[in-house]
Amino acid sequence: MGAIALPQPVRLRLGDRSLQGLLLLALGVSLGVAVLLPVGALVSRSVFDGADRFVGLDNFIAYLRTPSLLDSAWRSLRVASISAALCVSIAYVYAYALTRSCMPGRAWFRAIALVPLLAPSLLMAISLIYLFGNQGLLKAWMGSGSIYGESGIVLGSVLWTLPHALLILTTALSTTDARVYEAAQTLGASGWRQFLTVTLPSTRYGLLMAFVVVFVLVITDFGVPKVVGGQAGVLATDIYKQVVGQQNFQMGAVVALLLLLPAVAAFAIEARLRRRQTAALNARATPLVPRPHALRDTVLLVFCVLVAGALLGALAVAVFASLASYWPYNLTPTLRNYDFDNMDGGGWATYGHSLQLACATAVIGAAATFVSAWLVDKPRHFGAARGALNAVATLPLAIPGLALGLGYILFFNAPWNPLNGLYGTMGILVICTVAHFFSVAHLTQLTALRQLDREYELVSEALGVPFWRTLFTVHLPVCLPAVLEVAGYFFINAMTTVSAVVFLYSPETTLASIAVLNMDDAGDVAPAAAMAVLIFLTAAIARGLLALVQRIVLARTQAWRHR
């Protein structure tokens, strides 16, 4: 018998290790440039004055001594807390109806509640103007009050963040062991007592997580406060005023860092809660199947009809207003408001720019996050480097878009930076958008990859198969559903984002979401509504096309799952 030749597989493994090391280095450097260095530039600018002299904490002291700026900070915390409390309360009841009742139309109610995910937050704010503004349909409902201010920010924030809370709470309420409820019934516990002693405690992590997510979304949002905030300044609008209105970059950096603090604190709290969370289901768990209860199901149905009606009503008003000739005096339908080339804001070209950004972000973002997740999970070497890469990849989750965008100005626009040629181009918009939404996509891909047993890599190494062949023939096909979902996630967020790119566009790269902002500023509210509706329709069509592509592709690549 001849001897088995081992040197070739060993050489392949050594070559694979070197290539994996190069990929780690390349992606680590890329993320460092896209995330760490802009944040570092933001921190650096906060301790220098306008003449580039080091002043330490003087800028922070000046901020604390400015009553209007300090009021904005407290208002941001107050508005975010109230919005989160209201949103999570509504979402919890809605999620309970979807998962714990037998009311009819649950699938439809779930679909309706998720519709705002496809629209920019600006759309809900504009709808509020047409409903409760000075010429709104329901202006009388406001009495002597006004929609412009804290009440408008809270209401608009609840409307656009509701789907985010609902997704978390639906998951929390779906993972329940029926045996616990059977035991409670055996002990004679009433339905209300079961809710207080079993349901609420078992979903407390979901409740707290939903509160944290909504709180961060609201406190870092720029669109809603900009449109309906009126004179009620918040941290997000203060950054915009300092940078765009006053060119005061050092104070803008201070406000951005202060905006960063509650976001970081919130995610630190979430991480602590996650470590303390225990499993809700074990191998012997029995799924909970809701039983009909006429009174409960009727009450929950009425509640869901009201919430879904409010969401659809807000969207319908924006669509109708975009088609009205002259609100509210001449409501004859017309497409004049869609003639963007004759409006302030950048014209139809802005819509084309958004499509370019969304397509590029979807492709690059999906590819980059898949590679980053693979490098974190699959190689057996470079443990410290892989841990560092994972930390940097999840960092954008705690960085508000406005803070990241300002960091990009300070870093990429610096005269000494060889990359300053990117400033004002579509390239920097793509980089910033991918970086801004990188974390969620990275974690999604990482979750998908961790479902694969390590035996695949061990067998490939034993056979001398290059890692890249295993990646393309095993890992990528199996994880294709997650890759497609991530591509859709990047596309929709690139179409709707405002905060991350509001400082980075040029006249040649103005985006549709920025055009909405500019037209609203110029008083062209109906054209702004029209552009926001166009963004929403584009995102909805893209979502539908993606579902079709998924169905076709997965039928060919995922047939093994159903054998």
Image (cartoon, rainbow, N blue to C red):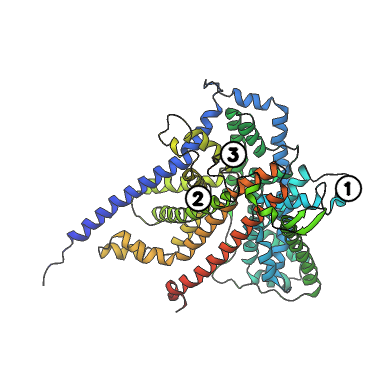
Q: Earlier in the sequence, mark 3 or mark 1?
A: 1
Image position of 183 (left or right of 141): left
Residue at the far bottom in the pictured view: 563
For disc 2, the neighbor class at 10 Å (few under 14, some 14 to 19, many from 20) is many
Which residue is label 2 attached to? 438
Which x, y percent locates residue 28? 40, 45
Residue drawn at x 39%, y 42% is 29
Which residue is label 3 attached to? 260
Name the amino acid type tagged 1: Gly
Which x, y percent locates residue 343? 66, 46
For disc 3, the neighbor class at 10 Å (few under 14, some 14 to 19, many from 20) is many
Check if mark 2's residue and mark 1's residue have beta carbons within 8 Å. Answer: no
What element does badge 1 sit on?
loop
What element does badge 2 sit on?
helix
Q: CA distance from mark 2 to mark 1?
A: 44 Å
Q: Of residues 133 and 233, which is closer to you in this image?
A: 133
Q: CA distance from mark 3 to mark 2?
A: 17 Å
Residue drawn at x 63%, y 29% is 246
Which residue is label 1 attached to? 143
Q: Pick the quarter of the image with the C terminus.
A: bottom left
Note whether 548 is above or below 411 in the view shown: below
